[in-house]
Image (tube, rainbow, N blue to C red):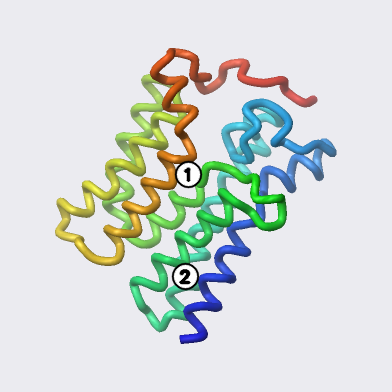
Amino acid sequence: MILPIIAVIACYLLGSVSFSVVLAKGLKGIDIRQHGSGNAGATNTLRVLGKGPAILVLALDVLKGIAAVWIGHWLGGGSEWVAAISGIAAIIGHNWPVYFRFRGGKGIATAIGVMATLFFFPAFYAGIIAILSIVFTRFVSLGSLIFVFLTPIFLLISGEFGAYFWASLVICLFAFWRHRSNIVKIIQGKENKLGSKGGTRIV
């Protein structure tokens, strides 16, 4: 019983490593949460620091999710529930990081890593639709919400009603909660589009 608990705690601590905060501090000596949209994630890193740092942050945040699932799998003896809860713990850490006064990102990149590792094809199908929505609308937030909303649906279609479905549902609820201000802005037509001047670029 102790190893699964260790896995969940370790994955929360891993998720709490906010790479956008660390990178912005290391490269420019700034707290990225005080610039752009104020979010500690890849999209705001793109606005504030540019493409290179944003791609690095995205990759590292996705890797956090992948690593968390595997940690849960190994320490949980292959249990689907432990792997799923460990992945969720990493997302919670990303959203509310203990190292950075519990002010983190919105968890989508880490959720991508978690979902793609736990249930690749449902996440893949949802991801294709999400990417197309971003291409046509240029709303990253909308694409993110489409991704987390459709993944549980594709899991149900595939006949998954166990740990993975419930994990995907929790991840979806977290994402919608963290994006509640974005949802309001989309409805009001005030949401920043990808590539727009949503914040001051630090050069």
Say which amino acid is labelled 2.
Trp
Q: Nearer the viewer, residue 137 or 192?
A: 192
Q: Position of residue 3 (x, y in %)?
A: 51, 83
Q: Position of residue 38 (x, y in %)?
A: 65, 32
Q: Quadrant of residue 81?
A: bottom left
| Residue found 37% across the figure and 53% down from its top | 170
Q: Secondary structure at mark 1?
A: helix
Q: Quadrant of residue 115?
A: bottom left
Q: Nearer the viewer, mark 2 or mark 1?
A: 1
Q: Secondary structure at mark 2?
A: helix
| Residue found 71% across the figure and 51% down from its top | 100
Horizontal relation, residue 118 to residue 87: left or right: left
What's the CA distance linking mark 2 and mark 1?
Answer: 18 Å
Q: Which mark is residue 26?
A: none
Name above or below for residue 60 compared with residue 145: below
Q: What residue is shown with label 2?
A: 70
